[in-house]
Amino acid sequence: MASSATAVEEAVETNIPARMDRLPWSRWHWLIVAGLGITWILDGLEVTIVGALASVLTEKGTLALTESQIGFAATIYLLGGILGALFFGYLTDRLGRKRLFMITLGLYLVSTVATAFSWSFLSFVAFRFLTGAGIGGEYAAINSAIDELIPARVRGWADLAINGSWWIGTAVGAASTLVLLNPSLFSHTIGWRLCFGLGAILGLSILMVRRILPESPRWLMTHGKMEEAERVVKSIEADVAGEGGIEKLPNPEGSIKIQQRGSIGFGHIAKVMWGKYRQRASLGMALMISQAFMYNAIFFTYALVLSKFYKVPSGSVGLYILPFALGNFLGPLTIGRLFDTIGRRAMIAITYAISGLLLAATAYLFAQGSLTATTQTIAWSVIFFFASASASSAYLTVSEVFPMEMRAMAIAFFYAIGTAAGGLFAPWLFGILIGTHDRNILSIGYYAGAALMLIAAFCEVVIGVKAERKPLEEVAEPLSAASAA
């Protein structure tokens, strides 16, 4: 891998970014949302299924795992996501968005089917690792494509709403467990295996949609494929104008001169990220670490808390996850537009701060024994109405504040850092805390999550980036721009 970029002599002026940003919202954009948003639905489904199955998988006749093994399996899933994001993220910047979001979806499909046929703890962990690798690779490829295909004026809302669709997968997973884990319909020895088949069904249904999605014109134009980029943009413009009966699209504003380059290696990426964009890199770490710790700590052990502290039967856990999922989905969907109007800095800081303060208050009530399974669920649903928007805004931030040529790698890097530092050991740690059956000890973990969210809110106030309604090339100049070269 090259540690520096090699420039091609000829500079080419293009208005492709401006042409993509001036497009009116259309069915074509909804196709992008549907075809790429499935990633978060699949991840939400996977996490929910394993969370709901936590108590079932400890039963004899299934895999008979211990509580610590359940937490360890969740950690291994996240480790797979980290390594998959880094590996496939590099390939996404090098080989293109479309090629990689097909490959990573394929890896997910094969791995989740294999999980359904696990026969031991080791096989279960191995297949969970590969499933996580597929999902981690998807995060890098999909976030890159979304930002580069969605108009700047609605990029914040679209990105948050798509990331929020994670909770559609959660709701589907929760609803499915009510049926598949109902002992009067399916034995637990079979039901848990059927649960993993749902992910494969959803993944297969989206393969045909993804096949007709285009490569990112922005990626093409910076990789010496200007003619192909022009063809793709003209095709998109024709589709959008045709469906709306538009005789003439608005005139694009501005152009950029591209000094086309060869591949960009890790050394050059690191130099740019921790040199010119040091403050943005620090911000990305704070946002990603805090939201990853909070989410992974609470959600991966959601079922265990309900069953151990509130004596909720495993077959009924889905009833408590459904309202929680609804609150998480409605958050980005309803307040997401404010990130484009009020602005990134104010809204990110507000949602992080509210999430942290509410979590701290709930931790206190939990430690005092003042909550029931119902009121605990209500409290978490309210908290994550805001936390879901803040978590989605973390991905939005790291995907739009760095140059295009390193976008997928930046997403992968911060996903990996955030997940490793904030989430890799959180499920395992909280599994141990739950195993003590002591409310006061477990509440300490919740207080830690609240503190991290408040720290991230402060960082956003101080060094946040005002990227709302701005073209990506204005937020961060491409490395291949003639002025940068």
Image (cartoon, rainbow, N blue to C red):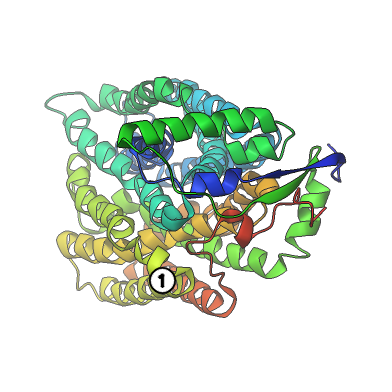
Q: Residues within 10 Å of mark 1 (few under 14, many from 20)?
A: many
Residue hosting label 1: 347
Whole-percent x, y for residue 385 in the image: 29, 62
Q: What number of labels is visible?
A: 1
Q: Amino acid at mark 1?
A: Met
Q: Nearer the viewer, residue 130 or 20?
A: 20
Residue 190 location in percent, x, y?
Answer: 28, 21
Image point (73%, 59%), residue name: 273
- Using residue 113 as the reference point, say whether residue 365 is left or right of it: left
Residue drawn at x 22%, y 33% is: 176
Question: In the figure, residue 27 lies in which quadrant?
Answer: top left
Quadrant in the picture for residue 281: bottom right
- Asked if one can make out residue 122 in the rendered structure from this viewpoint, the answer is no
In this orientation, does residue 177 appear?
Answer: yes
Q: Nearer the viewer, residue 90 or 50?
A: 90
Question: Could you say where residue 117 lies in the image, as x and y percent from the top left?
Answer: 41, 19
| Residue 368 versus residue 90 in the image, above or below | below
Viewport quadrant of the N terminus: top right
Seen at 50% across and 49% down, the residue is: 251
